[in-house]
Amino acid sequence: MALPININDLIYQRTVEQNRIEYKEGWNPEPIIHSISAFANDFDNMGGGYIIMGIEEENGRPVFPIKGLDPDSLDEIQLDLLNKCNFIEPRYIPIIEPAVVDGKDIIVLWIPGGEERPYKAPEKVYTEKGGEKSNKAYYIRKGSRTIKANAREEQELISMARDIPFDDRINYHANVDDMRPALMADYLKSVGSDLYDSALNRSVEAVGTDMHIVSGPTEYRKPLNVGLMFFNERPDNYFSYARIEVVDKPEPTGHGMTEKIFTGPLDKQLNDALSYIKNYIIKEYVTKVQGQAEAVRVYNWPYEAVEEALSNAVYHKSYQIHEPITVTITPEKLEILSIPGPDRSITDEDLKRRVLISKRYRNRRIGDFLKELNIVEGRNTGVPLIVDSMQENGNGLPEFSTDEDRSFFLVTMPIHPVFLENSLSGKDKTTVSSSADVEKGTVRRSKAEIRNLIVKTLEKDGNQSMNELATALGYAKLTNTLRDVVNEMIETGKVGYLYPDSPRSRKQKICLKR
C-alpha cells in the first residue's frame, strides 16, 4: 500500500510540519508505541502524524546520509509492530509503508487521528511476554514531543472521546462512488504520491481506503466528509453553501455591483476565486519618479495577503453551518467573512494584537489536503504573512474581528491610501492596471478605465483613429487590449466607425454614438 503523500517531501518536512513527524534510527518499541498512541489521540486536531524508522534525528531534523534499516529485518519489525499495537487500548493499527530512499530501506508509519479516541498505551512495552500487564496511560503530543498526559489533559482528552472533527467523519448520506476517480488521480499526481500509478486501475473504494477517505465495516463502506469535499464536483450538494462568493461593490447603494460564485471541490473553488481576484480585483499603481530609473509600484491589496486570508477561511470555516465564505470589495476595503469565529483560546486581546495562535484546529483533514497541494502554509503562519504583506505594500494593518459568541470571523484589509485619491490623471505620470490587462512595455490600465478614457478622449478631441486613440491614452503603440476594448464598445453600441461601410479604410476613425 502506498501513501497519499510524497515520501521525499515528508522526510524533508516540505508539506507536513516538523512537530507531526518523528524520526527513529531503528525499531524501538516503547517510544514508538507511545507516539503512535499520542498521534492517534490527536489532542490538538492536527491530523495525527508520521513516524519514520531508519533515519536518525537531531533537533527535530533528519540526519543525512540516511542509515536505513537492515533489509532482512523489515518483516520482523512489521510483525512485532502489529503485535505491540495490540497493547494499545482500544486497538489501533497505523498504516505501514516500507520504502526505499537513497538506496536505503525505511518504514513509514502514517498515524491519522483515531475514530475511537482516547487511546491508552502501556507505560512499559516489554520485548517479551508480559508487556500487556503494564500500567497504561494516555499520551499526547506537545510540540514535537510525546508526553504522558497529566490529570487535566486526561479529562480534556476523555471529553473529546466522540468529538471527531466534522471533515473526518463518515457521511452516511453518500456513497463511495460519489467520489470521482479522475479527481482522486489528479490529486495524487499533483502531490507526487506513488498511489497515482494504480489509482485509475483500482476501485474508488480501494484507493479511497488507502487515502483514508473511506471508512466503515466491509459490508457498509462510506466516504468521509473530506473525501466529498475534495473529490466530488459539487460538494455543496452535501454541505449546503460550501462555496465562495466574491462581491464587488463599487458604490454603497449597490449600483454596478457584481457577484461571482465559485463552487466545486474545495481546492478548485479556492483557486478559481483567487484567479478571479488576481485578474480582476487586484490593481497596480505605478508612479514614475523623476531622475529614477525604476518606477514605484504598489497594489490596492497585496495578492499574497488576500491569498492567505481566503485560504485560511476555507481551512477553518465550519461546513456544518450553511453559510458561504464571502469576499466583499468596496472602494475603501476588502473583507473576508467566514463562519464561525476563532476558538476561544484566541482572546480579544490576541485579535487586537494580530497574534492568532490556535490551540486546536477545526478541520484537521482539510488542512492536510490544502498543505499537500501547497495552497496553505504550515501551522499558525498565515496571520504573520498577511500582516507582513500588507505593511510591505503600504496598506496599513489588517483587522481581525469577531463577536462575543464567536459566531463569525472577519478579516478587513484597508485599501492602499493612494487608491483613495479622486484623480489618477497624468500629473505624476501614474497608471493603474489589473493583472488581466498587463501588456509588457505599455501603460497598463483595467478595461473599465480604458473605456472611460476612450469616451473622454472622443468627447474632448472628437473622432480618432485607432493609432490616435493609443497615443491619446499614453500607449507607446496600438495594443491588443485597446483593440479588444474598442471592439467590445462597438458591439455594445457605445462607439462606432465613422465610415461603417469601409471598416478597413485608412481614413477610418472611431466616433461616439449618440
Image: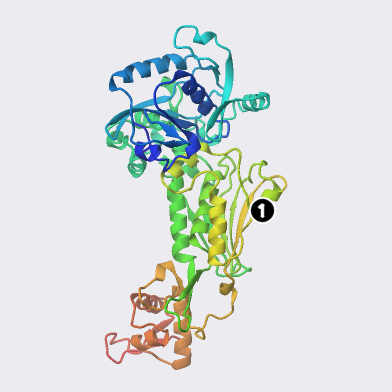
Residue 319 lies, with reference to residue 394, above or below; the image says above
Q: Position of residue 415 (x, y in %)?
A: 58, 67
Identify the image quadrant of residue 490.
bottom left
Disc 1, SS? helix
Q: Residue 457 at x, y = what percent?
A: 45, 87
Q: Nearer the viewer, residue 251 or 47?
A: 47
Q: Is residue 369 above or below residue 297?
A: above
Query: 275 above or below 267?
Result: below
Q: Which residue is mark 1?
A: 353
**Which image quadrant: the N terminus?**
top left
- Residue at image location 45% in from the left, 44% down from the top: 371
Task: Say how many tags the image has.
Answer: 1
Residue for point 50% across, 50% down: 311
Answer left or right for 474 relative to 312.
left
Which of the 4 image quadrants contains residue 485?
Answer: bottom left
Q: Quadrant of residue 148?
A: top right
Instruction: Please state which of residues 102 and 506 is positioned toward the viewer in this rendering.
Output: 102
Q: Hey, which residue is sitting farthest right in the picture?
A: 404
Q: In the image, is 227 to the left or to the right of 142?
A: left
Q: Residue at x 49, y 58 (%)?
A: 304
Front-lying residue, 464 or 104: 104
| Label 1, residues with CA under 10 Å away: few <14, some 14-19, many ≥20 | few
Q: Image height check: is 30 above or below 214?
A: above
Looking at the picture, which amino acid does disc 1 mark? Arg
Q: Residue furthest top?
A: 129
Q: Is residue 29 visible?
A: yes
